[in-house]
């Protein structure tokens, strides 16, 4: 029987409370947002769903109830790297944790199973395909279980951005373990996805805790794609030299090309995609996690499962599939709460490519309709002239405080909007008169009156629309066409190899019944001025204190991480190191008061940390 928090057992031992464990184990002084309510609900035996942004503290929502309840908490996660890092951090904090996945040998897996049966584990991280085996389910039935935590719960939904078929089988948990509380957690889920998560995991009658999706420390910026690799190099060199970052590309080939370009430019970059040798991929991820200033370039479709808190930027060179995917991927920046950038290049080719992938997929018509709707919402985010944060939060049903977030490109440098109705009519007429089967480049040649070989071969120089668009240049016409696709007046035709055709709404534009307002493309000089107001790179910590001490602490942390074979942030986060610098503690009690220093970390590292502080004071 579970002890009530604060009560005592027959031996007179006081049962811990959630806040006491938060402080003693994790070294944190207080809960954030909905954490306390969620932990209280689950610790009391209740099931629930939790929507909380990346870096919002989801892990504590199942880690603390697992420590408060009798038995072992089972955490279902598809991300092996994340399992490894979380377990390493828990072990360093004094929590009895382990993993059970494909990385273990038979002997190692046997040892973990024996510890579980003996009641020697507080938390066990299990891959979904392992959990669903008859052997594992039988093992769990012979074990006292505190709870089931289903992390990355959006993977259970066919409408989610990262659907994994093995997650559907997790409905067995409600059927075979009805008395064990279940907590499903995700950072991204629209209404449709939430409903499917609840149905599949037996949580229809369970409460849903929804934290704010806002990540105020992340600055969102979306720029017109011109030369994506050159734009990326400039972005990193001017704003994030020496910072850790993630770059997402759509294809493996583009990943490798981008890495080569960054390395040539003197930026330490590594590739990471499913086509690589597994051992090389693991080495690259380990370097990214353990070294400072590494840029990892990965395919958008590949979930990295990283838990690195000091990623200062996430860049997209290609359009993701949905706002959910964009939000999840950009959310890997700034988990430590410090200023970070989410930067993306975007162009017409991105829309055409994503639409073609949907049209050519083997999914049902319903799946394709949902996918197109999600793509349209993301394109709307790219093309909006208003606050990007307001648009992003609105997608998840959350209102943005105030008319301006002051931390996205549209708010810091509001774009101008112009009446593009006449220009839109010219484009749509050109599309119609050329047969609705040509791409943007050919249409622009016709509008500008260029007698190229292809134009003359097709006889398009004889059309009434030939040369009617000389008031705009190539770049401006590309922007007009891209926005007409974004507004739904044009769409790509997969049968015409990406050629553009009119939609039903184009009729109103051609008749003059529909006004078309367009964003004015920002000039390069304005872009440079905008950068001056951008979030700065993360060179120095905020607040007072010795930079020499911070360097000494980081060097000590790096050495300790190498010695223990774990990422540096598992030892102590940057925020904790900076807290030590700011507090300059003279005693173990003063050191213990720094957020991030729990009892076990004080016991293991206290003397070394205080020695570094004293050495700095004597210099």
Image (cartoon, rainbow, N blue to C red):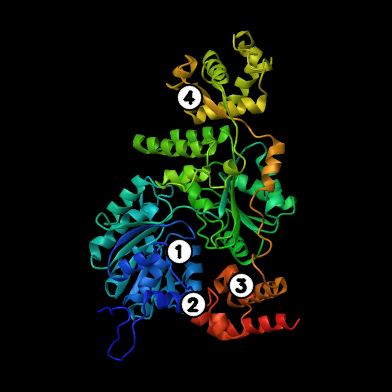
In the rendered image, which residue does mark 4 sit on? 489
Task: Report, in whole angstroms, how far the alpha carbon at label 3 lies from the one at label 1.
Answer: 19 Å
| Quarter of the rendering occupied by the C terminus | bottom right
Q: Residues within 10 Å of mark 4 (few under 14, many from 20)?
A: many
Vertical position of residue 110 compared to residue 244: above or below = below
Q: Tag 1 or tag 2, which sits nearer the N-term?
A: 1
Disc 3: which residue: 577
Q: Position of residue 428 (x, y in %)?
A: 53, 18
The reply, left or right, for residue 612 in relation to residue 377 is: right
Q: Which residue is drawn at 69% across and 14% down?
A: 451
Quickly name the residue at label 1.
57
> Mark 4 and 3 residues: CB-CB less than 8 Å, in contact?
no
CA separation in Å, label 3 and label 2: 16 Å
Q: Which is more N-terminal, label 1 or label 4?
A: 1
Write down the quadrant of residue 21 in the picture: bottom left
Residue 456: x %, y % from top left = 66, 12
The residue lying at 36 percent from left, 55 percent from top is 166
Between disc 4 and disc 3, the foreground one is: 3
Q: Where is residue 89 in the image (x, y as percent from the top left)?
A: 50, 72
- Residue 498 visible in rendering: no
Question: Which structural element holds mark 1?
Answer: loop
Mark positioned earlier in the residue sequence (2 or 4): 2
Q: In which quarter of the image is residue 223?
A: top right
Q: Give how far apart the Cα atoms at labels 4 and 3 are.
A: 54 Å
Helix, strand or loop at mark 2: loop
Could you tell whether 48 is left or right of 334 in the image?
left
Q: Earlier in the sequence, mark 3 or mark 1?
A: 1
Crowding at label 1, few (<14), some or many (≥20) Cα neighbours within 10 Å?
A: some
Q: Between residues 302 and 333, which one lies in front from this camera angle?
A: 333
């Amino acid at each position: 029987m579970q002890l009530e928090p604060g009560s005592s057992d027959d031996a007179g031992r006081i049962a811990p409370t959630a806040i006491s464990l938060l402080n003693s184990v994790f070294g944190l002084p207080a809960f954030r947002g909905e954490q306390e309510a969620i932990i209280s609900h689950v610790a009391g035996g209740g099931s629930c769903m939790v929507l909380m942004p990346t870096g919002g503290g989801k892990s504590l929502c199942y880690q603390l109830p697992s420590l408060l309840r009798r038995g072992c908490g089972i955490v279902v996660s598809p991300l092996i790297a994340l399992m490894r890092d979380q377990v390493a951090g828990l072990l360093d904090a004094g929590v009895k944790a382990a993993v059970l996945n494909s990385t273990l040998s038979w002997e190692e897996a046997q040892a973990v199973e024996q510890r579980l049966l003996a009641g020697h584990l507080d938390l066990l991280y299990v891959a979904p395909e392992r959990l669903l085996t008859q052997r594992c389910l039988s093992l769990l039935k012979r074990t006292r279980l505190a709870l089931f935590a289903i992390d990355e719960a959006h993977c259970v939904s066919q409408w989610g951005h990262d659907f994994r078929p093995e997650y559907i089988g997790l409905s067995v948990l409600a059927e075979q373990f009805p008395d064990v509380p279940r907590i499903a957690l995700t950072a991204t889920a629209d209404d449709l996805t939430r409903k499917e998560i609840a149905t599949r995991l037996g949580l229809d009658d369970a409460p849903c805790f929804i934290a704010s999706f806002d990540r105020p420390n992340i600055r969102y910026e979306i720029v017109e794609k011109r030369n994506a690799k050159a734009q990326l190099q400039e972005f990193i060199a001017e704003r994030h030299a020496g910072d850790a970052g993630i770059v997402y590309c759509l294809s493996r080939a583009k990943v490798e090309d981008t890495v080569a370009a960054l390395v040539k430019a003197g930026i330490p970059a590594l590739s990471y995609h499913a086509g690589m040798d597994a051992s090389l991929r693991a080495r690259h991820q380990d370097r990214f996690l353990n070294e400072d200033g590494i840029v990892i370039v990965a395919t958008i479709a590949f979930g990295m499962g990283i838990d690195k808190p000091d990623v200062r930027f996430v860049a997209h060179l290609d359009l993701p599939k949905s706002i959910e995917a964009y939000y999840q991927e950009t959310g890997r920046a700034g988990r430590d709460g410090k200023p970070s950038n989410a930067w993306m290049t975007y162009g017409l080719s991105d829309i055409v490519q994503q639409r073609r992938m949907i049209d050519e997929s083997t999914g049902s018509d319903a799946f394709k309709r949902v996918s197109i709707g999600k793509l349209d919402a993301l394109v709307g985010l790219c093309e909006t002239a208003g606050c990007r944060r307001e648009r992003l939060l609105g997608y998840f049903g959350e209102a943005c405080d105030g008319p301006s977030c002051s931390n996205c490109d549209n708010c810091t440098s509001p774009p101008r909007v112009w009446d593009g109705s006449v220009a839109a009519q010219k484009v749509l007429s050109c599309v119609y008169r050329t047969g609705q089967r040509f791409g943007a480049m050919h249409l622009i040649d016709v509008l500008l009156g260029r007698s190229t070989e292809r134009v003359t071969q097709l006889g398009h120089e004889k059309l009434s629309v030939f040369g009617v668009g000389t008031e705009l240049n190539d770049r401006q016409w590309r922007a007009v066409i891209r926005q007409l696709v974004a507004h739904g007046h044009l769409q790509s035709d997969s049968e015409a190899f990406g050629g553009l055709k009119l939609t039903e709404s184009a009729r109103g534009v051609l008749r003059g019944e529909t006004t078309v307002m367009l964003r004015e493309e920002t000039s390069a000089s304005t872009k440079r001025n905008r950068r001056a107001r951008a979030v700065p790179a993360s060179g120095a910590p905020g607040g007072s204190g010795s930079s020499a001490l911070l360097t000494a602490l980081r060097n000590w942390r790096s050495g300790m991480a190498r010695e223990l074979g774990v990422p540096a942030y598992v030892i102590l986060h940057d925020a904790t190191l900076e807290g030590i610098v700011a507090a300059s503690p003279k005693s173990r009690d003063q050191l213990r008061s720094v957020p991030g220093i729990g009892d076990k970390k004080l016991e293991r590292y206290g003397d070394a940390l205080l020695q570094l502080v004293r050495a700095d004071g004597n210099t």
